[in-house]
Amino acid sequence: MLIFEHARPERVNAAQLPAQDDDLYDIPESLRREAKPGLPEVSELQAVRHYTRLSQQNFSIDTHFYPLGSCTMKYNPRGCNDLAMLPGFLNRHPASPPRLSQGFLACMFELQEILREVTGMAAVSLAPMAGAQGEFAGVAMIRAYHASRGDTARSEILVPDAAHGTNPASAVMCNYKVKEIPTDDQGDVDLAALRAAVGPQTAGIMLTNPSTLGVFERHIEQIARIVHEAGGLLYYDGANLNAILGKVRPGDMGFDVIHMNLHKTFSTPHGGGGPGAGPVGVSERLAPFLPVPTVAEEDGEYRLLTERDRPQSIGPLSTFMGNAGILLRAYVYARLLGREGMQRVADFATLNANYLEKKLVEAGFEAAYPARRATHEFIITLRREAKAWGTTAMDFAKRMLDYGVHAPTTYFPLLVPECLLIEPTETEDKATLDRFVEIMATLREEAQREPDKLKGAPWTLPVRRLDDVKAARQLDLVWSEGGETG
Amino acid sequence: MSNIPQELRYTETHEWIRLEEDGTLTVGITDHAQHLLGDIVFVELPEEGEECAAGDDVAVVESVKAASDVYAPVTGEIAAINTKLTDTPELINQDPYGEGWIFRVKPMDPEDYDALMDADAYQERISEEGE
């Protein structure tokens, strides 16, 4: 039921407060609205109940196992939240002068330094407000770098066919043409195709390593050499940084630009659209182009560097410096873990993924890359189940909801038919993983015996199977009286 | 089994091509392709009069699963587009070789048509894919 359907005319959104006269005396007559705004007229209690009920119907990391591949839905430690919500941080105005923001700026400076160290890059900016904006900033820096050298013939960005869809989108946003590079049958970039594709038109390559196929790109040094020799730059999509945190550094692999999704690897809350944080790191030669502001420290004093200090910067990306509250949570998380803890993240993320993959294969499922060791995530393909019983990856995903597990990522990457991309993360225990294997085995039995149980799922949730075709074809979401949409 | 009409020509990228009496080529995506994509929800068409080279992506077909480029099979000029697809993209699912055609191209070199794959070669190509 929509909140509009709870509404009744003239019902006001207050508890038992006596009615008050509208205090409009200082608004000129001509500026006062005549018609009521189209808001639902419900009581305060109704509004509370409505949204509490909606939140109870939701799947979240706080309520359910959530092995959504590539998204790294790990537990967000409550301590990070508590410290980021200290009154000194909450009440700080973003425009307050640096001398009144030294505590906050110190945290941001240290976060820059921690991210610089853990990625092996020369400099970091926290400015991007999300991963996609980090990508945009990264590609914009590649463009600015080539332009600063008068090297304007470089018009192409190379993107492996396994890439996240945001990679080609970011390249196009920065006015580059995208050339796709195929992947070989072991999940590595096809080096022969890469050699054939590079040239004086190559501005750079965007790579995710570990790749979206859940395997480590073994030829990374050769790829770096091929692209660098052609005069191009290497862009690292940090979506899968969780697997290698504290183990191996993108800077050491030869990358020139990297964005990190703090809302993944550094465990800040995400899902449902943010807020995110997508800091960028760069090698020495790209440092002048970093987005502003960044934080500098001189004699124990912290201050923000702007375009005045960094004239070659690609500029600011928002009014202030990134999502401050999210950056603080990531800072606390990084400090809680320390060097040793970060390595444990990578250890247990990969251990959990490999354990789960092995158990699922034992339960009869087919791994997409059986010859490869998984990183922090892995892919199973349900093509056999789809062929034999007509039960697709989507049917498995929907039926899983009935058993209280959020479905893994489905149908991505596009290279693998009927796939589930599964990422358990390091914060789940063995019992949870074993329970997931049990559920998957049950689903497989159901698929064989009563495939309709899968095809009609979910059965137990407030909303049944959605008509995704209708949802994509009719995009009208505006409620209006009498059920008319428009 | 997917339907592969004998009288049409095909590409590696799952377009079909029909030679019209006026020498233009009608292009759509094959039954096999529409089946792989699933329910089509959006089609982005080229513009009439646009020039294209063989292999250029000239249209986009989007399903609930994925978005997929449609490539020009030959070099030439876009002679017509199927505007019905804008409101009823499902025609590609319902009638891929008829009402679901996507665009018509006037080839620069009419002999390019003869170089395209015939039905048997396409049949072989998709059995290799093992789908």
Image (cartoon, coloured by chain):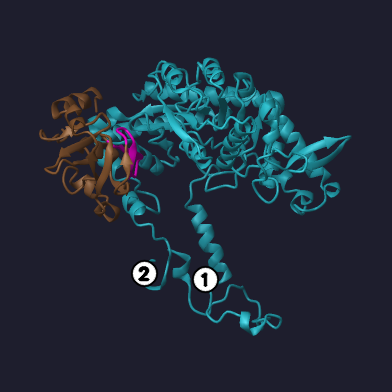
Chain colours: A cyan, B brown
Cβ atoms under marks 2 and 1 closer than 8 Å:
no
Q: Is residue A263 above or below residue A351?
A: below
> Residue at the spot x=47%, y=18% of the render?
A373
Placement of the N terminus of chain A among the 4 image quadrants:
bottom left
Query: How would you rate the neighbour count of disc 1 (Cα within 10 Å): few for under 14, some for 14-19, many for 20 or more?
Result: few
Main secondary structure along the magenta-highlighted residues: strand
Placement of the C terminus of chain A among the 4 image quadrants:
bottom left
Q: Residue furthest right?
A: A299
Q: Amino acid at mark 1?
A: Leu
Q: Amino acid at mark 2?
A: Glu
Which numbered tag is attached to residue A355?
Answer: none
Residue A336 is at least partly visible in this image = no
Q: Is residue A151 left or right of residue B96?
A: right
Residue B48 screen position, x and y as percent: 29, 49
Which numbered tag is attached to residue A484?
Answer: 2
Q: Is residue B114 left or right of residue A34?
A: left
Q: Callout 2: residue from which chain? A: A
Spatial CA distance of label 2 from label 1 is: 16 Å
Residue A375 screen position, x and y as percent: 51, 23
Magenta region: B53-72
Q: Which residue is mark 1?
A: A39
Q: Is residue A450 left or right of residue A275?
A: left
